[in-house]
Amino acid sequence: MTNAPVRYIVLHYSASYADLDLGVEDIRRMHLDRGFSDVGYHYIIKRDGTVQKGRADSIVGAHVAGHNTGSLGICCIGGLERATGPNVGVDNRTDAQKAATIRLVRDLLATHPGAQVVGHRDLGPTQCPGFDVRSWWASVDTGSASTVTTPEIPPTIRRSSRGQHVMTA
């Protein structure tokens, strides 16, 4: 455990093909096979945009050598295409993954103000996550990320609610 302030929110890809529907248990198994004590990431974002919890935020991750203390790791499933093979990382996140990443990062920044949003490749010699995270996040933060679609979120319905979103049996 650590009390270190979160300096970085680090985006990763799983270095898996886009047609594989992996989740946190798959990544955990891969990491355990590599000698890790648990899944190295704090969050996994599946292809459908589902966010799964990995390590507790209070536990130092195992996702970016030299920068694990003071960082939170988010891994989007994907990053490889069969046409280009296993040595070329690409940004093949789905719109659902992009939207989920934006929501998660904004939530984490609310809890950890001042943290920088970076890619694994900004902190070490790797292609991961297959795109320039700093530029992408700057475009999201200014509202100019045209490739991101945010799904409509239905309103909270309470007993006294009325209107088009309320259905009765």
Image (cartoon, rainbow, N blue to C red):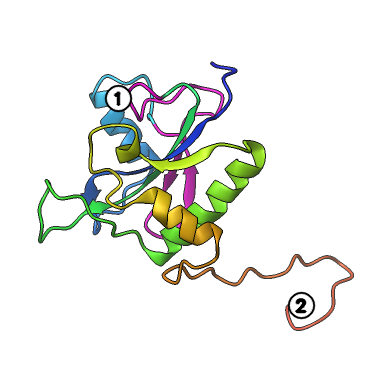
- Of residue 53 and residue 42, the one placed in the foreground of this image is 42
Q: Quadrant of residue 153?
A: bottom right
Q: Which mark is residue 166?
A: 2
* The magenta stretch spans residue 53: yes
Q: Main SS type for the magenta part?
A: loop
Q: Earlier in the sequence, mark 2 or mark 1?
A: 1
Q: Residue at x 67, y 70 (%)?
A: 154
In the image, the segment drawn in magenta is 41-67
Dot 1 crowding, Cα within 10 Å, few <14, some 14–19, many 20+: some
In the image, taking residue 152 as reference, residue 167 lies left or right, namely right
Assign the N terminus to one quadrant of the image: top right
Residue 39 image position (x, y, % from top left): 38, 30
C-alpha gap between disc 2 and disc 1 = 46 Å
Q: Quadrant of residue 44?
A: top left
Mark 2 lies on a secondary structure that is loop
Identity, as a three-letter code, of the amino acid under mark 2: Val
Identity, as a three-letter code, of the amino acid under mark 1: Leu
Q: Residue at x 55, y 36 (%)?
A: 115
Assign the C terminus to one quadrant of the image: bottom right
Mark 1 lies on a secondary structure that is helix
Dot 2 crowding, Cα within 10 Å, few <14, some 14–19, many 20+: few
In the image, taking residue 5 as reference, residue 75 lies left or right, namely left
- Of residue 99 and residue 113, the one placed in the foreground of this image is 113
Residue 107 image position (x, y, % from top left): 61, 47
* The magenta stretch spans residue 128: no
Q: Residue at x 34, y 38 (%)?
A: 122
Q: How many marks?
A: 2
Residue 99 image position (x, y, % from top left): 49, 61
Q: Which residue is mark 1?
A: 32
